[in-house]
């Protein structure tokens, strides 16, 4: 079982609409949680990075929330644009020594914004 | 500003041939450097990371190797490619392990 689970696996929305992507993780203890945007055939681009003490962080139309108690994070996209079509990946870094410090990558949510 | 360059963008190589992918970073010094592979429908897999010149840590035993001959240069190599080496290879850098990573544009490798 992947330690970082994302849902939905894919999502189609109309331009201008809002959407929320979910990330549940079991990595514990954890150091930080990141959201990346990856366009098809390109490298991921960082959207946000949050430590366990942060509840929300915004980057333009992207807002990430984190509930360290329930081990859940969400990425909310406001007023979607066609350029938001991409894969959104949740990544969690563990806290500790050795393998516990690794970055655990989710499989991503594939978002398609249609006109 | 910092930039990362990775090339080539696409590569088709026959089985058994050697491989050399190069990645360079500009605008920063002593970065952490990473090589990832992304297979279709799967998450990013860390292959190698380096915290300094000549310091390479391997995450997954495999047919590949990495070298860091200069502070801002990271090279992924193979002596003999396998079909299973096909994939999307990404180079990345970060200031530290706890900060965001910045990725190159990736290399699509197809081994035929």
Image (cartoon, rainbow, N blue to C red):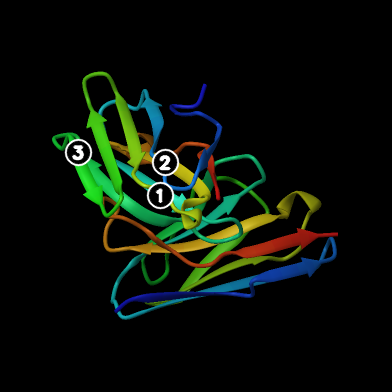
Circle 1 residue: A36
Circle 2/circle 3 CB separation < 8 Å? no
Chain ID, mark 1: A
Element carrying mark 2: loop
Whether the residues at callouts 2 and 1 have beta carbons within 8 Å, the answer is no
Q: Residues within 10 Å of mark 3 (few under 14, many from 20)?
A: some
Tell me, yes or no, whether the two marked residues, 1 and 3, touch with CB atoms within 8 Å.
no
Kindly state the secondary structure of the residue where label 1 is placed: strand
Q: Is A53 on the left-hand or right-hand side of B56?
A: left
Q: Which mark is first along the chain, 3 or 2?
A: 2
Labels 2 and 1 in the same subunit: yes
Q: Quick one: A6 or B86, which is closer to the camera? A: A6
Residue ID for mark 2 = A17
In the shown orientation, is residue B9 left or right of residue A111?
A: right
State whether residue A44 is above or below residue A91.
below
Visible residue check, residue B9: yes
> How many residues crowd mark 1 within 10 Å: few (<14), some (14–19), many (20+)?
many
Q: Are marks 1 and 3 on the same chain?
A: yes
Q: CA distance from mark 1 to mark 3?
A: 15 Å
- Residue B102 screen position, x and y as percent: 39, 62
Circle 3 chain? A
On the image, the x and y values in percent for residue A67 come to: 23, 26
The outermost residue toward the top is A70
In the image, A38 versus B39, the foreground residue is: A38
Label 2: few (<14), some (14–19) or many (≥20) C-alpha neighbours in 10 Å = few
Q: Is residue A110 left or right of residue A74?
A: right
| Residue occupying image coordinates x 39% and y 76% | B3
* Depth check, front residue: A57 or A20: A20
């Amino acid at each position: 079982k992947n330690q970082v689970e994302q849902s939905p696996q894919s999502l189609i929305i109309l331009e201008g609409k809002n959407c929320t992507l979910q990330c549940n993780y079991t990595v514990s203890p954890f150091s930080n949680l990141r959201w990346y945007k990856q366009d098809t055939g390109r490298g991921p681009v960082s959207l946000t990075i949050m430590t366990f003490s942060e509840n929300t962080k915004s980057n333009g139309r992207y807002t990430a929330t984190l509930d360290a108690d329930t081990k859940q994070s969400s990425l909310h996209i406001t007023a979607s644009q066609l350029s938001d079509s991409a894969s959104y990946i949740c990544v969690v870094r563990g806290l500790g020594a050795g393998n516990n410090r690794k970055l655990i990558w989710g499989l991503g949510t594939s978002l398609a914004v249609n006109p | 500003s910092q930039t990362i360059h990775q090339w080539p963008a696409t590569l088709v190589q026959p089985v058994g041939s050697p491989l050399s992918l190069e990645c360079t970073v500009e605008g920063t010094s002593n970065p952490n450097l990473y090589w990832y592979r992304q297979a279709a429908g799967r998450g990013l897999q860390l292959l190698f990371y380096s915290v300094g010149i000549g310091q390479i840590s391997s995450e997954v035993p495999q047919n590949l190797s990495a070298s860091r001959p200069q502070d801002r240069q990271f090279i992924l190599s193979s002596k003999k490619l396998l079909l299973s080496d096909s994939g999307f290879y990404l180079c990345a850098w970060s200031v530290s392990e706890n900060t965001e990573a910045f990725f190159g544009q990736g290399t699509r490798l197809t081994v035929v």
